[in-house]
Amino acid sequence: MKTEGTYDVQAIRAQFPILSRKVKGKDLVYLDNAATAQKPLAVIDALVHYYSHYNANIHRGLHTLADEATAAYEASRTAVKDFVGASSPDEIIFTKGTTDSINLVAHSWGKSFLQEGDEIIITSLEHHANIVPWQMIAAEKKAILRVIPIDDNGILDMEAFKAMLGAKTKFVSVIHVSNALGIINPVEEIIELAHQHNALVLVDGAQSSVHLDIDVQTLGCDFYAFSGHKIYGPTGVGVLYGRKDLLESMPPYQGGGEMIKEVRFEHTTYNELPFKFEAGTPNIADVIALKAGIDFINNIGKAVIRKHEEMLLEYATAQLKDIAGLRIIGDVKNKVSVISFVIDGVHPQDLAILLDNQGVAVRTGHHCAQPLMHRLGIVGTTRASFAAYNTLEEIDVLTQALNKSLKMLL
Amino acid sequence: MNNQKTIKNIEQDLIDDFSLFETWEEKYEYLIDLGKKLAPLDPAFKTEDRKIKGCQSSVWIHSYKKDGLVHFEGDSDAIIVRGLVGLMIMVLNGQPSKEIVGAPLDFINTIGLSSHLAQTRSNGLRAMIKQMKMDAGVLG
């Protein structure tokens, strides 16, 4: 067995209270990180501290609590700006999550700029969150949704993509890392090709934001969307990065407080970026605590965490391949620490139930990517996904629990 | 004289059986075994209108009336769920419509399967029971 080197995984685990709990009498082995990551104490404390010390509505009140809350909220925006390499905090819009971010772009940009016959391109690997909003706006605008095909391993057919691009292509929305399979898509190349045809590109970073170094300026994407809860932050907060000139050209998505400059019954002038897109009292507590999640990652270093996760992935891949009848879906080199697999004659739901009884949390099913499952000819997979706090011993528990489950089922 | 066991009787039998299981493994081995033994549903009955489509697996319930009583057959593509189908058929099959519709089915909590009731998105027992009761109500 490999050693974990200087990476002090136990010190990291100690920061996560939930990891010491028992599930059905067994130590929790949490391997559903691609669904949501657990929260370090710093994130939980940030929430408690906000509500205990400076809960106030932001940007408007002229009192100490409002000043403190506003400062913390905007500090989080700056932390996010640095996290994704944006050029200005004005390019960072707080949303409810990735789904909300994509809906914002599809509806705000789509409403203003899409015309009949225009084409939007997505991939066969998309999460429903990057399919349905585009279907909705395409139907409304009589635009056409096109899908880049994949091979049996889940690799995008880039030649087919090139052939799809043309004068009608207005928008390309692509998942950076497949949530179902962990495959990293060649988004740099996709962005470059799309831009050659003057099409805009949104990168769904729900899975990539926690694993890969993100610099939206180097990537050159026009929009980048991700969720706070997958990067060790709270649920209910997400981010939309958008190029400033684009965001300025787009109409507000929702109307209400905060997003206005002046309201008369005859006419309303909208606020500046980023507030134009943050109608109503935002999710202040979760936005503030999101910074603690980002700090957690930065304190260890994304590259350091990635190295640990790659080691876990390599070990787990070797262990799982030893199980008779097990087939990894998307068994490619360029992927993050996610293993999605099927086992001959075994339904993923049965596995999930038996693994849960052994304290092991994995995700099973279609992973909100039904078209992908359909393309691969499977009903679903079992997915184990690893994070900064997972250990080699936990992978051993997974392997043993899988073997035991199979013995019971077959 | 009616020698047919009531729903309550069958529930009690199951509670007695399950009380003998000391580990979770025994409980699930029982369900898996029940799933394996359940007679497969005639593919002709695996139609969309008999399907309870879940997030994870599919369940089919075929209901019909014979001699004034409601009968069920069922199937699932997942074996533990199939066991749960078998369990519910064991309890509700061949009972009067009124009894099925009104059955509280408390035994599910007693035998420690309540977690399967909570799984609303993954085709838990709840959806299955709802369908069976609805069918029984319609068949009258």
Image: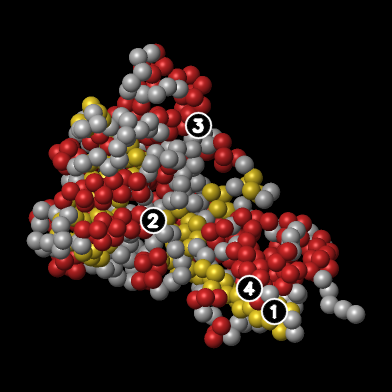
Q: Are marks 3 and 1 in contact (CB under 8 Å)?
A: no
Q: Quadrant of the C terminus of chain A?
A: bottom right
Co-location on one chain, circles 2 and 4? no
Question: Mark 4 falls within which chain?
Answer: B
Real-space CA distance between mark 1 and mark 4, rounded to the nearest whole angstrom: 13 Å
What is the three-letter code of the residue carrying label 2? Asn
Which residue does the numbered mark 4 point to in the structure image?
Answer: B138
Which residue does the numbered mark 3 point to in the structure image?
Answer: A44
- Give residue A13's position: percent from left, percent from top: 52, 38
What is the three-letter code of the residue carrying label 3? Ile
Co-location on one chain, circles 1 and 4? yes
Badge 3 or badge 2: first in the primary sequence: 3
- Give residue A46's position: percent from left, percent from top: 46, 27
Q: Residue at x 67, y 50 (%)?
A: A24
Secondary structure state at the residue bearing disc 3: helix
* Between marks 3 and 4 in the image, the one whose residue lies nearer the viewer: 4
Q: Nearer the viewer, residue B66 or A75?
A: B66
**Residue A396 visible in rendering:** no
Real-space CA distance between mark 2 and mark 4, rounded to the nearest whole angstrom: 42 Å
Badge 1 or badge 4: first in the primary sequence: 1
